[in-house]
Amino acid sequence: MLTLQIIREQTDMVLERLAVKYCNANETIASILSLDDSRKSIQQDLNAKQAEINALSKEIGQLFQAKKVDEANKAKEQTADIKEAIKVLEQQMEAVSKELQDAIITLPNLPHISVPQGKSAEDNVVVKTGGSIPDTNGLVPHWELTERYNLIDFELGNKLTGAGFPVYIGKGARLQRALISFFLDRAIQAGYVEYMPPIVVNEDSGFGTGQLPDKEGQMYYVNEDNLYLIPTAEVPVTNIFRDTIVKSSDFPIKCTAYTPCFRREAGSYGKDVRGLNRLHQFDKVEIVRIEHPNNSYAALEEMVAHVESLVIDLELPYRILKLCGGDMSFTSALTFDFEVYSAGQQRWLEVSSVSNFESFQANRLKLRYKDAESGKTVLAHTLNGSALALPRIVAALLENNQTPTGIQIPKVLVPYMGCDVI
């Protein structure tokens, strides 16, 4: 959430940066500034009325001491009238403050100055590529391989739940577990502390990281309990630090977690949803960092390098993209996406997003730190990244490593799989 201070003090800059995300916020910001003026005016009236109350209270005491009871009682009547006026002003203040807050939370985060112009994924900028794309001649897509080797049953998942909820079987299940363990082990080696959080969260948690109200329609909702199934471990893990003041000496705070993730993916169709390409339930290992503002972009580089090392060790051809303004999330200030090449489908598949949210989430979370020099409490910066999401990694591993006699397992996964070929 943007701060009112930055909206008021740097209005032109805010409008300019939001335009990079193709957000025309002129009317919203004009409304915010008007509501803030109203709030200040009401506050001034409240302060004046409270000053009258204080003065009358003092006067009443003096009148009673002077035995001027009638005058004291008249002053008390005036006090009652002023208190009634204060009650009305407080109601107005509550209404205006809520309207002001509701307007502010509709504004997305400001994109970093380095974010490229662009309206959609086609305008994202490839900043790095790695690995070699294999010869795709004769290769088949993963949904044929999973059926051939009895690794994943999509129809059984459809029977049990519905489309987008596959059942992993035998070595397909073992491959899932191997990848999860590999990703967690590497995160722990990199200094991340492992958490095992709940996979359902309350509304405050969804609001804190920006999924609510922005992505409410994409989340599964348990209406009787007013809880949401998590779309990513980012939500519960980052909310561990909601309403918290951390110490400067605590930085960097590095967390990792494996969770199932649930997304409705409303409106998805066609080749993008075939097989493992787009699921309603999938597994993911997440890395989250809470950082000092001065170090958050260095931390972002470290996180990108960490994800890149995983993809390299899995021997997958990959590319890293800097997202353009029109393809960025509501909460992000700067995002790098990772894509791996799917040889059987002959297309690139997104497997990770690594983002710096600067103070946007922290403001919603009330996540602050005490500055060692000034002693003031300051908003921290939050970051997160997929390290990694499993479905499309599995799709690429199966497709890129298929041979006439089976599927080769990358060397780093052999100890976890207990075999070097499926």
Image: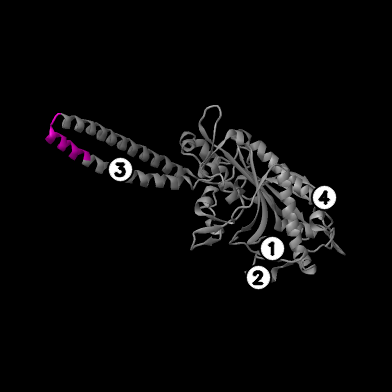
**Relative image position of residue 225 (x, y in whole percent):** 49, 61
Residue under the point 65% across and 61% down: 279
For the C terminus, give its image quadrant. Answer: bottom right
Labelled pair 4, 3 in contact (Cβ < 8 Å): no
Q: Earlier in the sequence, mark 4 or mark 1?
A: 4
Q: Earlier in the sequence, mark 1 or mark 2?
A: 2
Dot 2, crowdedness within 10 Å: few (<14), some or many (≥20)? some
Tag 2 residue? 158
**Relative image position of residue 21 (x, y in whole percent):** 57, 45
The residue most toward the top is 373
- Foreground: disc 4 or disc 2: 2
- Foreground: disc 1 or disc 3: 3
Tag 4 residue? 132
**Relative image position of residue 68 (x, y in whole percent):** 12, 32
Which residues are the magenta region? Answer: 66-79
Tag 3 residue? 89
- Foreground: disc 1 or disc 2: 2
Q: CA distance from mark 4 to mark 3?
A: 68 Å
Q: Earlier in the sequence, mark 4 or mark 3?
A: 3
Q: Secondary structure at mark 3?
A: helix
Residue 20: which quarter of the image? Answer: top right
Is 340 on the left-hand or right-hand side of 207? right
> Is residue 102 magenta-colored?
no
Q: Please state which of residues 340 and 126 is positioned toward the viewer in this rendering.
A: 340
Q: CA distance from mark 1 to mark 3?
A: 58 Å
Q: Secondary structure at mark 2?
A: helix
Tag 1 residue? 271
Q: CA distance from mark 4 to mark 2?
A: 35 Å
Q: Please state which of residues 152 and 171 is positioned toward the viewer in this rendering.
A: 171
